[in-house]
């Protein structure tokens, strides 16, 4: 049986509620219907440079997945971003959840400068954009823990399985959510280091739509295994 490792992050500075958790769990539920032969292991990664590497390595060893996708939030983006390249750099103005604030540090001193995702990002993009869904190909995952995990995932899997990272925007529960509900959400601050877009409004997408996009990304990848 094919196993998907699907990871998400919890809260971090500026993002008191991380929507990647609900999206990961919703994707697991959706795939139970659309891909019943697929085992989906949903796990949280800590928003910490060092600890995320350790936990990710343990999860890959425990589940030996045939497919691995990490999800993260990029506040300020207005589309689901299929990340294509992870760079060998930790550098952020905000600290991780362990208090580490790294500047211009390599993730792996002897590692390559960058890794490319092995997910079929172009095929996923073409499938989704043909449905006029809010999705884009992205060439920067930031330099915070999202990019760190993306790089470590590609290093660990070494091209043996389809693997990669998908950034999601902030989400809202309903497509027609009113201003009162939006005003009740915790305040979010976008950080470019975390892949976000600073200095403007913080767009949201319906949570169900984002779940559907991630589900389709998985199904497109499975079709190519």
Image (spheres, rainbow, N blue to C red):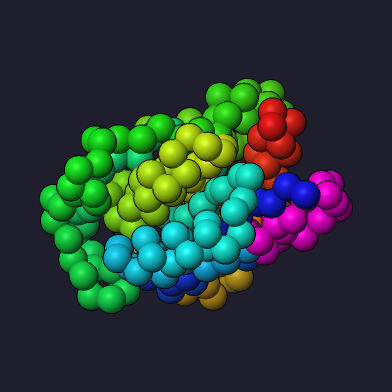
Which residue occupies 47% across, 44% down?
157
Towards the viewer: 189 or 104:
104
Which residue occupies 58% across, 29% down?
120
Towards the viewer: 205 or 210:
210
Q: Is residue 209 visible?
A: no
> Is 103 placed left or right of 223 in the picture?
left
Against 37, is 220 above or below?
above
* Image position, residue 92 (x, y; %): 21, 57
Q: Main secondary structure of the magenta part?
A: helix
In the picture, the quarter occupied by the C terminus is: top right
Towards the viewer: 2 or 21:
2
| Rendered image quadrant of residue 54 | bottom left
Against 34, is 52 above or below?
below
The residue at the far left in this view is 104
Range of magenta residues: 23-41
Whether residue 60 appears in magenta in the rendering, the answer is no
Which residue occupies 61% across, 70% down?
181
Towards the viewer: 192 or 150:
150
* Image position, residue 67 (x, y; %): 61, 45
Whether residue 34 appears in magenta in the rendering, the answer is yes
């Amino acid at each position: 049986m094919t196993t998907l490792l699907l990871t998400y992050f919890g809260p971090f500075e500026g993002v008191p509620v991380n929507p990647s958790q609900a999206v990961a769990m919703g994707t697991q539920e959706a795939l139970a219907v659309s891909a019943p032969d697929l085992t989906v292991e949903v796990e949280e990664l800590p928003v910490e440079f060092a600890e995320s590497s350790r936990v990710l390595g343990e999860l890959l060893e425990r589940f030996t997945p045939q497919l691995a996708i990490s999800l993260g939030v990029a506040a300020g983006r207005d589309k689901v971003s299929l990340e294509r390249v992870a760079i060998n750099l930790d550098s952020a103005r905000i600290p991780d959840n362990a208090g580490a604030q790294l500047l211009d540090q390599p993730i792996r001193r002897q590692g390559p400068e960058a890794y490319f995702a092995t997910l079929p990002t172009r095929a996923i993009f073409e499938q989704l954009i043909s449905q006029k869904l809010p999705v884009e190909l992205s060439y920067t995952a930031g330099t915070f823990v999202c990019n760190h995990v993306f790089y470590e995932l590609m290093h660990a899997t070494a091209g043996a399985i389809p693997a990669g990272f998908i950034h999601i925007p902030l989400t809202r529960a309903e497509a027609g959510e009113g201003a009162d509900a939006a005003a009740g959400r915790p305040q979010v601050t976008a950080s470019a280091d975390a892949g976000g877009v600073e200095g403007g409004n913080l767009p949201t997408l319906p949570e169900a739509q984002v779940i559907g996009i991630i589900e389709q990304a998985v199904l497109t990848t499975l079709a190519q295994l």
